[in-house]
Image: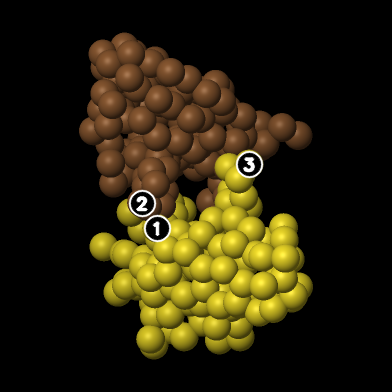
């Protein structure tokens, strides 16, 4: 079974600074997807960034980038130039694209990020 | 395009009552699923469906029933609510051809007293 671990329950960062959220996972699969979701106080689940395991290049979306280390089973999220609107709960998630339970997401417990002015 | 619609947004139930959380999507997605979110636990899979007439259990299925009679709808039934089912519930849908693009509903906050 797959597991996703986020070891930082809470983090804070000053506006305009950079912060990195950690995520590790455990799987015996070779092909899979990894995601970071943002959940602001509105409760909406917002996809921040995704990574396909077979791609060596780290995904980037504007101020958000990942450090994907497949051998170490690590998938950290870096937020550059932090903004007040980045304040939210962030969830790391794993997905198998095939086999039983394909398409379902396995989530970590989340990291609550506060951006301070 | 409404996406995934969940109703109601909030609900308070008494222990032992039954209710159905509704989920509808208008994107013709084959895959639909229900998650519950508890403080400090992340989101956990309750039940899922890969198409009309096909459902399966997730990580935490006890106390919940589902059915999938149409592609659009995937209701979640609580037969006899318990305080342990107090949670926020999310419905999600996706296409098997675009698995990385899951769409989530706005969530239902359920309190069982």
Can residue B28 be seen?
A: no
- Give me the C-alpha separation between circle 2 and circle 1: 5 Å
Q: Which residue is mark 1?
A: A109
**Residue at figure coordinates x 42%, y 43% from the top left:** B37
Q: Given the current orientation, which residue lies at the most extreme left position?
A: B62
Mark 1: few/some/many CA within 10 Å (<14, 14-19, 20+): many
Q: Which residue is mark 2?
A: B41
Q: Secondary structure at mark 2?
A: loop
Picture quarter with the C terminus of chain A: bottom right
**Residue at figure coordinates x 50%, y 37% from the top left:** B91
Q: Which residue is mark 3?
A: A42
- Give me the C-alpha separation between circle 2 and circle 3: 18 Å
**Residue at figure coordinates x 54%, y 56% from the top left:** A89
Are both tags, 1 and 3, on one chain?
A: yes
Chain-order first, disc 1 or disc 3: 3
Q: Using the rendered view, name the quadrant where residue B58 is placed.
A: top left
Q: Which of B1 and B16 lies nearest the eye of the viewer? A: B16
Pointers 2 and 1 in contact (C-beta within 8 Å):
yes
Picture coordinates of residue A81, whole percent (x, y): 74, 76
Mark 2: few/some/many CA within 10 Å (<14, 14-19, 20+): few
Picture coordinates of residue B83, whole percent (x, y): 28, 26
- The hue in which chain A appears in the rendered picture of the protein: yellow
The brown-coloured chain is labelled B
**Residue at figure coordinates x 33%, y 19% from the top left:** B113
């Amino acid at each position: 079974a797959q597991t996703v671990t986020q070891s930082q329950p809470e983090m804070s960062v000053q506006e305009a600074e950079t912060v990195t959220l950690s995520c590790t996972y455990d799987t015996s699969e070779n092909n899979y997807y990894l995601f970071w979701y943002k959940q602001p106080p509105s409760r909406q689940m917002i996809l921040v960034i995704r990574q396909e395991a077979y791609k060596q290049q780290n995904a980037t979306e504007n101020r958000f980038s990942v450090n994907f280390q497949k051998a170490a089973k690590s998938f950290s999220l870096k937020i550059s130039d932090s903004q007040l609107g980045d304040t939210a709960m962030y969830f790391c998630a794993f997905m198998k694209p095939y086999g039983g339970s394909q398409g379902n997401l396995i989530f970590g417990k989340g990291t609550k990020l506060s951006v301070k002015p | 395009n409404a996406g995934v619609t969940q109703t109601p947004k909030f609900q308070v139930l008494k222990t032992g009552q039954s209710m159905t959380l509704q989920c509808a999507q208008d994107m013709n997605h084959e895959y639909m699923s229900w998650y519950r979110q508890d403080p400090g636990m992340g989101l956990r899979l309750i039940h899922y469906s890969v198409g009309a007439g096909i459902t399966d259990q997730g990580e935490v299925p006890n106390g919940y029933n589902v059915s999938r009679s149409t592609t659009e709808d995937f209701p979640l039934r609580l037969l006899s609510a318990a305080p342990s089912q107090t949670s926020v519930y999310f419905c999600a849908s996706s296409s098997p051809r675009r698995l990385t693009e899951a769409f989530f509903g706005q969530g239902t906050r359920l309190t069982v007293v």
